[in-house]
Image (cartoon, rainbow, N blue to C red):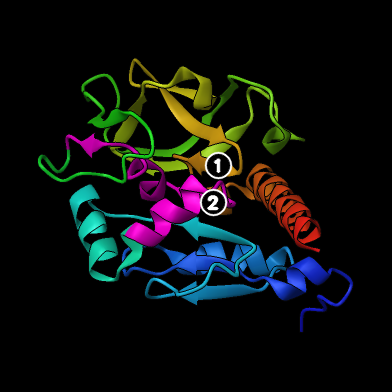
Amino acid sequence: MQNLNADPIQADFPVGLIDYGMGNLQSVENALTALRYRVERVVFAPSHMDFLALVLPGVGAFGDCMKSLQDKGFLPFLKQWISTDMPFLGICLGYQILFEESSESDGDEGLGIFKGKVLRFPGGKEKVPHMGWNSVQIAKSSTYLEGISSGDYFYFVHSYYPDVLQKEIILLQTDYGGVSFSSAISRGNLLATQFHPEKSHKKGIQLLTNFLYRAKMARCSEKKAKQ
């Protein structure tokens, strides 16, 4: 059994794992609990914001994901959470839907948090989907990247990637099939990755550790401000 008594922030606030029916939640949950965080699966939009952080994993089609989130009432909640700079981690499809639209699902709007469109790899030079281990290059310094270096490998499974227009949010870059794409972005307490940190062994766990530590610091600051 987890002993969270030594850390009141971890004890007070669970990590909210958004379950909208399309993510491989178990591997993410396993990684979070291995790091000694309490995880709460969130099936419908909650009426409160008492989470240490929100994690949005995802596999499947862009349009189906947006429809599922809408049907479960998540869209206004997610936009409010992100707009107030609460700790948020998007993984794979949970990264892509932060953008305006996708060529995978014409006519379906994303959350529109960031400008840009999600595109498909052209194919031909390399197989699509992009599946397996690939390296990253650091685009900007960040506390999210403590213990992570250019050339480190992470695990990818995707056919689409965001064409990021706001260059200042690009955290990591990766090359595949003649395309250099943004494999991670960050802004404030938001982190989003195209790769799967929960499947990326030591470096993936390091990234999760960094994200959750920063989430705790943000929640500590908020708690002190209210005292």
Label 1 neighbourhood size at 10 Å, few (<14), some (14-19), many (20+)?
Answer: many
Sequence-wise, the earlier of marks 2 and 1 is 2
Quadrant containing the C terminus is: bottom right
Q: Residue 115, how many percent across, how many down?
A: 33, 28
Q: Residue 206, how many percent across, how many down?
A: 71, 45
Is 44 located above or below residue 148 in the figure?
below
Residue at 55% x, 67% y is: 49
Lateral position of residue 141 relative to residue 137, left or right: right
User: Which amino acid does the dot numbered 2 rest on?
Assistant: Phe
Lateral position of residue 185 relative to residue 181, left or right: right
**Does the magenta-highlighted stretch encompass residue 9?**
no
Query: Rounded to the nearest whole Å, what is the CA distance between mark 2 and mark 1?
Result: 6 Å
Residue of label 2: 88
Q: Secondary structure at mark 2?
A: strand
User: Which amino acid does the dot numbered 1 rest on?
Assistant: Leu
- Which region is colored magenta? 76-103
> Residue lying farthest right?
6
Q: Secondary structure at mark 1?
A: strand
Q: Residue 175, how many percent across, how many down?
A: 44, 20
Q: Quadrant of residue 126?
A: top left
Is 221 located above or below residue 133 in the figure?
below
Label 2 neighbourhood size at 10 Å, few (<14), some (14-19), many (20+)?
Answer: many
Q: Quadrant of residue 163?
A: top left
Point out which mark residue 191 bears. Answer: 1
Q: Residue 136, how many percent across, how many down?
A: 56, 26
Task: Assess whether mark 1 and mark 2 are in contact (beta carbons under 8 angstroms).
Answer: yes
Residue at 24% x, 30% y is: 119
